[in-house]
Amino acid sequence: MKLLLTSAFILLLFSCQIATKKQFDVVFSELNTNTEASLRGLQVVDENVVWASGSGGTVLVSTDGGDSWNDVTVPGTEKNDFRSIHAWDDKTAIVFGVAGPEFGYKTIDGGATWNVVFQDTTRGLFFNSVKFADVKHGLAVSDPIDGKFFVLRTEDAGISWTQVADLPSVEEGEANFAASNTCIEYLPSGRAWIASGGKAARVFYSADFGKSWQVAKTPMVRGLTSSGIFSVEFINDNEGVIVGGIFDQPELNTNIASYTVDGGVSWLPAVTMPNEYRSCVQEVKVGKESLVFAIGKTGCDISTDGGINWNFLSGEGYYTFRAVPGQLSGFAAGSSGRIAKVEFN
């Protein structure tokens, strides 16, 4: 009996090793967007409906899987940069800019008209990311004001927003990055996370739809204005991944990725790091097949074990990525109006 059990265990271990070593490659097919805007906001509703946003007040929407794009730029916002976007369908979307006093705009007619949903004259506001957990619950985060991150909550699909009061103080020189609209993660369970960088690299976490927050240290690179955590993604309430690095020294890859298995209370450094600095990390899931994909301006990597180990895929660089729900594919966006269809094989 002992011999049979030992043999069974060895077979199971061998099978698990095969599964963890499953190989993927990636194919980027660049699309024609007819814009030169820098695109850091991206939302993939499904295989057909894709929204993107960026510099010059630019907002784009495609309803045919990226074959054609409709420019629905918000009128009068040419000096703004919409680094944050969320879309519910082909008609309804919200954008947040880095300049005010009118920061948030929403459309319910596919971008034909936009209404202001958040405005504020507070000096120093600079919105880095917006994320929705479900149809109604959303969060938006700005750089610190008076020693705390400026966090907004909505419970009515972005029509109205209220500022969160219960937040830990930031450390001197701590901020967020508006690199890919992924410094916030927010799940339907009400759990949420905000990643920071600069002089500190920490993760703020909430279990009550963003009403109250705690903060955890991480082993991520820190100390420089352009260093720290650039993106956070959670596979479920407990398992999460963060990536980043040093923006202006992308070739350095010490402590540029970490993972958690306890909901972000504690973080461990990845055993094998991504190849270089990465600005965005997202899960790609089809049924039981799940992988984690990280991308930045100098290339991309993949993990099949929840961010513990990373394998370099390609030197093709983009700022941000979103998966097509239920498919091993997605879209990436970057500089000079570049958007590509991404397929994993």
Image (spheres, grey):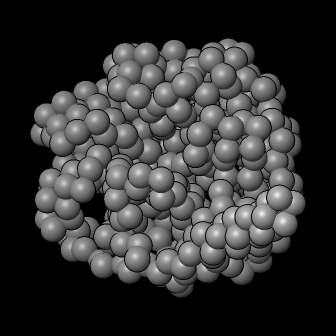
Q: Residue furthest bottom?
A: 315
Q: Residue furthest front?
A: 1
89 vs 19: above or below:
above
Image side of residue 71 versus residue 139, left or right: left
Would you say residue 255 is visible in this rendering? no
Residue 229 figure quarter? bottom right
Residue 270 figure quarter? bottom right
Image side of residue 166 versus residue 82, left or right: right
Q: Residue at x 22, y 51 (%)?
A: 49
Residue situated in front as seen by the camera: 80 or 317: 317
Q: Residue at x 65, y 57 (%)?
A: 306
Image side of residue 43 versus residue 23, left or right: left
167 vs 267: above or below:
above
Question: Residue 54, image x and y in percent?
Answer: 38, 55
259 vs 13: above or below:
above
Number of labels in the image equals: 0
Q: Residue at x 74, y 53 (%)?
A: 259
Q: Quadrant location of the N terminus?
A: bottom right
Q: Quadrant location of the C terminus?
A: bottom left
Question: Residue 75, image x and y in percent?
Answer: 22, 43
Would you say residue 210 is visible in this rendering? yes
Image side of residue 211 versus residue 309, left or right: left
Q: Residue at x 40, y 55 (%)?
A: 286
Question: Residue 329, image x and y in percent?
Answer: 36, 65
28 vs 176: above or below:
below
Question: Residue 150, image x and y in percent?
Answer: 63, 28
